[in-house]
Amino acid sequence: MNDGDLHVRRLASAADALPFAPLTFPTFHRTLFALGHESGPVMLGASRRGEPVGLALAIVKSDTAQLLSLAVATHARGTGIGGKLMVELESILRGEGVARMELNFTDPNATSEAWRRLLRRAGWSEPTPRMRLFTLGRGSLETVARARWMSRQEPPVDCALFPWTDLTSAEEGELRAEVGPDSWFPPVLSPFAMADPIDARLSVGLRYQGRVAGWLIAHRIAEGTVRYTSLFVRQVSGLRGAGLVLLAESIRRQLSDPGRDVAATFGIEIQNPLLAFAERRLIPHVEVVALRTSFTSGKWIEPGHAS
């Protein structure tokens, strides 16, 4: 697409993507540089007089595309570049058989209102709350570690905790084969949902009657900051409360190395019963460095499908 001196094109390789890397978060760089592989992302770059000024990055799973990043250089915002990237990306994905586009964004942040305006203009659904996002400082984690509920967290009967790095190849294969709409765990909470290397020290699994039934997967997202990325336990009667067991174990492991980590960030889905526990037993007693909400929105782009 050419619009005056603005040129929007699909990027075909990691070398194409390199000049646009500063426009997206470091978290997405591994995804960005997978361009050119068979299952790699779809990425568009916008340039003005040869200068990268915008990008759109999406991954496709089955017939749904997840928009990971849409960014416009600070000095070029308010000029319609974001809208042009969205229109072009939608056209490309529709042509490749994608039926639906989805995205998540956080509020409040510096661009959340811009996101809302852009989504309304592009015909996306009204954003709905998806997850509450918390960031706690180390002092708050130490307070949590002294809480009475932490000391009571022991694995249920027939359960055993294990370092996630001890997951066997057979167990990994079984879990990967489960990923899908009919899986016993949501795909977004798959232990393999993120391509980035896990934090081996803090990531913990749970076996119930000898089979993997839960996990807490952590990633180091910045120097001194750990993200508890996914926490899930299979919903069976014998595992009631096991999610807290995994959380307590990871917190204890994080605090066992004084001086290394200064913050932890995590999210809890709005419908997760653990959110009520966090808001009642955790958040009122600690200093929350940041508290945000993740919203989700989507649009059907398949011809003839009403949004």
Image (cartoon, rainbow, N blue to C red):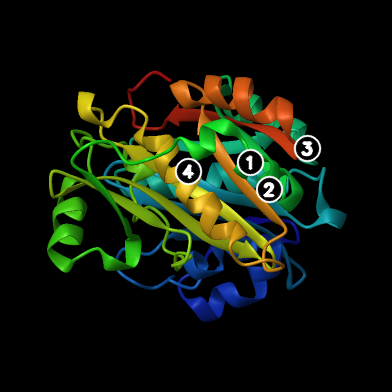
Tell me the number on the disc at residue 146: 1
At label 1, the amino acid type is Arg
Q: Quadrant of residue 257?
A: bottom right
Looking at the picture, how far across and down is residue 166, in whole percent? Answer: 27, 67
Contact, mark 1 vs mark 2 (Cβ under 8 Å): yes
Q: Is residue 125 visible?
A: no
Q: Marks 4 and 3, how far apart in space? A: 18 Å
Disc 4 or 3, which lies upstream in sequence? 4
Give the Cα separation between the discs numbered 4 and 2.
14 Å
**Residue 94 location, quadrant:** top left
| Residue with the mark numbered 4 | 247
Q: Residue at x 61, y 44 (%)?
A: 145
Query: Which residue is most to the bottom?
Result: 15
Q: For the point 33% across and 67% down, which residue is it?
A: 165
Q: Is residue 156 left or right of residue 138?
A: left
Read off the residue under disc 2. 142
Residue 217 percent across, percent down from the top left: 42, 53
Mark 3 to mark 2: distance in Å? 11 Å
Residue at 72 percent of width and 29 percent of height: 285
